[in-house]
Image (tube, rainbow, N blue to C red):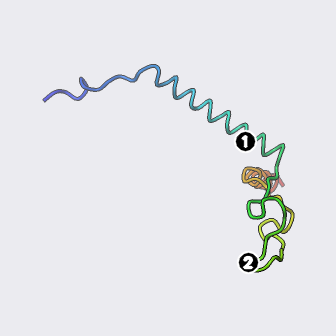
Amino acid sequence: MAPLAATATPALPHDAAAAALLLLALLAITLGYLATCWIFPFVACRGCHGTGKRRAPFGRAFRLCSRCDGDGYRLRPGRLVLNYLRNLHDKGTR
């Protein structure tokens, strides 16, 4: 039987470079999204497409969108997380 250590291949140096490049790309995407959440905290509501109105199931009547309460905008998920973390920090430092 052949020893297992003799059949193992060593890690190639380009694997570390690829992992570092992937990590750098993920960091850039995350920081870009956080900057977007900071500068543009609102996004158009997916339920009403930013109009604030929803068509009634029957007829031609409209009603206010229940997701955004008729505003047409909602907070981005990332901004909700930022607000939660800020509130958590404020409660912890009181």
Q: Position of residue 73 (x, y in %)?
A: 83, 58
What is the CA distance from the residue labelled 1 to the residue labelled 2? 36 Å
Q: Looking at the image, which is closer to me, 87 or 35?
A: 35
Q: Quadrant of residue 26?
A: top right
Q: Secondary structure at mark 2?
A: loop
Q: Quadrant of residue 66?
A: bottom right
Amino acid found under the numbered disc labelled 1: Tyr
Q: Circle 2 is placed at which residue position?
A: 57
Q: Residues within 10 Å of mark 1 (few under 14, many from 20)?
A: some
Q: Looking at the image, which is closer to me, 70 or 41?
A: 70
Q: Looking at the image, which is closer to me, 51 or 15?
A: 51
Q: Position of residue 69 (x, y in %)?
A: 83, 68
Q: Position of residue 55 (x, y in %)?
A: 79, 72
Residue located 85% across and 67% down the image: 70
Q: Is residue 92 above or below residue 53?
A: above
In the rendered image, the residue lying farthest to the bottom is 58
Q: Is residue 76 above or below residue 1?
A: below
Residue located 84% across and 43% down the image: 39
Residue located 52% across and 22% down the image: 17
Amino acid found under the numbered disc labelled 2: Pro
Q: Circle 1 is placed at which residue position?
A: 33
Please identify, in this view, whether the residue under mark 1 or under mark 2 is nearer the observer.
2
In the rendered image, the residue lying farthest to the left is 1
Q: Is residue 36 above or below residue 92?
A: above
Residue located 83% across and 77% down the image: 61
Q: Position of residue 71 (x, y in %)?
A: 87, 63
CB contact under 8 Å: marks 1 and 2: no
Label 1 or label 2, whichever comes before in sequence order? 1
Image position of 76 (left or right of 12): right
Q: Residues within 10 Å of mark 2 (few under 14, many from 20)?
A: few
Which quarter of the image is occupied by the C terminus? bottom right
Image position of 18 (left or right of 75): left
